[in-house]
Amino acid sequence: MTAPMNPALAATFSPPVMEARRWLNGVDFPADRPLINVSQAAPVEPPPEGLRQAIAEAALNRPEAHLYGPVLGNPELRQAVAEEFSAGYGTPFQAGQVAITQGCNQAFCAAMTMLAGAGDEVILPVPWYFNHKMWLDMMGIVTRPLNCDDAMLPDAQAAARLIGPRTRAIVLVTPNNPTGAEYPADLVAQFYDLCRVHGIALVLDETYRDFDARDGAPHDVAGRAGADETLIQLYSFSKAYRLTGHRVGAMITGPDRLAEAEKFLDTVAISTSQLGQIGALWGMRNLQDWLAGERLEILSRRAAATRALSQMPGWQLRSCGAYFAWLRHPYAGSSADLAPRLVREAGVLALPGTMFMPEGDQQGATHFRIAFANVDAAGIEALAGRLTGFDG
């Protein structure tokens, strides 16, 4: 007899990227027409050699690099994050406001576990980042979808109408995954004020903050009164320093909240990878000029994507920024059915909008997410050509 299954986990959809990879099975791509993979945003190149050398030397020469560390992260890295956020947002942060996590996904899971229980509610703008929705489903937390406007921006007044007695948080991702939209500072402030008035948390996932097209602080809410009680910022080292395999992220909030998050982090992983933390700290101390160059390259690819994808007959570029473009297709069929065909017939692997929207939502059926960060300008032009030539 099969043992009972957690119904919340059983009802959660399967990992979308893994599903998309299965579409490649049995498909051959000729040398003169290789696969264009725009399905995932993770960097595919290894970290710079100096960072890899720092990790290698630590593995060989630092015994503590193979032991458990502090649950909330190594003090030096926590301090470095506090200093960088202080400079980036123009307001003082302390190391005691920083927790180092096993990637930004774990930071989100810790934040949600800290804020909400089964039956509570969290507001997510749609399209959403699917791993956020997956964790809420696993926890039995009710997701309240918040529709975005034509510019793919959420509306604070619409969010206010969704707030009820069991609402615990609003989550914003900026620059956004999957749309690439950069949320204006005044919009973030409106959501902060809304959350402050209602006594709920504003969770800002800023995984792609290093590739924001705007100079200076993208918002000012971190310095506002009550930020320790209202604001939770999430960050990832994976995109900035190509540390995806080392799983290093951060959560920045008030010390009282971190004391609760520590319970979750200790239970799930005890401590974040020592080698990953050593690499992240070395990157922060030595790769700022290199990271600035990486940002310029991403902005260049954003410009190429905006130019190429906005000129395709019948297609509509809804939003483009950081690593992503949100693209409306011109066909009658659903993107869920078209996506596997794109692999076989056009040599393009892209995620359908259905993976980022509530089931049955027509916006999901009519859109694709294009993750262009790993494709150079020539590849983006080739992508546009293949999409234009696709017979949907």
Image (cartoon, grey):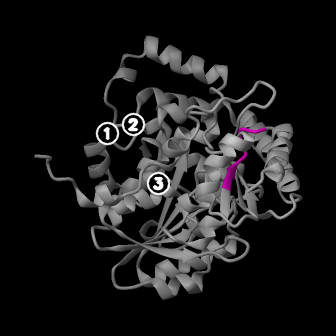
Residue drawn at x 58%, y 17% is: 53
Q: Is residue 352 visible?
A: no
Residue drawn at x 54%, y 76% is: 146
Residue range highlighted in magenta: 369-375
The quadrant of the rendering that contains the C terminus is bottom right
Examine the image and state in which quarter residue 164 appears: bottom left
Q: Is residue 182 visible?
A: yes
Percent x, y of residue 184: 70, 70
Q: Secondary structure at mark 3?
A: helix
Q: Secondary structure at mark 2?
A: loop
* Disc 2 + disc 1, Cβ < 8 Å: yes
Q: Secondary structure at mark 1?
A: loop
Q: Residue furthest left?
A: 1
Q: Which mark is residue 272?
A: 2
Disc 1 marks which amino acid? Ala
Q: Taking 109 as reference, is 64 above or below it?
A: above
The Cα atoms of the two marked residues, 2 and 1, are separated by 7 Å
Is 291 part of what is drawn in magenta?
Answer: no
Percent x, y of residue 197: 47, 84
Instruction: Give the labeled residue for mark 3.
Output: 131
Examine the image and state in which quarter residue 13 appears: bottom left
Judge from the rendering whether residue 93 lies leftward or rightward of residue 120; answer left or right.
right
The Cα atoms of the two marked residues, 3 and 2, are separated by 20 Å
Taking depth in this image into account, of 157 and 59 the one nearest to the observer is: 157
Disc 2 marks which amino acid? Thr
Judge from the rendering whether residue 174 lies leftward or rightward of residue 14; answer left or right.
right
Query: Few, some or many C-alpha atoms within 10 Å of disc 3 (few <14, some 14-19, many ≥20)?
Result: some
Taking depth in this image into account, of 385 and 28 the one nearest to the observer is: 28
* Disc 1 + disc 3, Cβ < 8 Å: no
Q: Which mark is residue 118?
A: none
Query: Few, some or many C-alpha atoms within 10 Å of disc 1 (few <14, some 14-19, many ≥20)?
Result: some
The Cα atoms of the two marked residues, 1 and 3, are separated by 18 Å
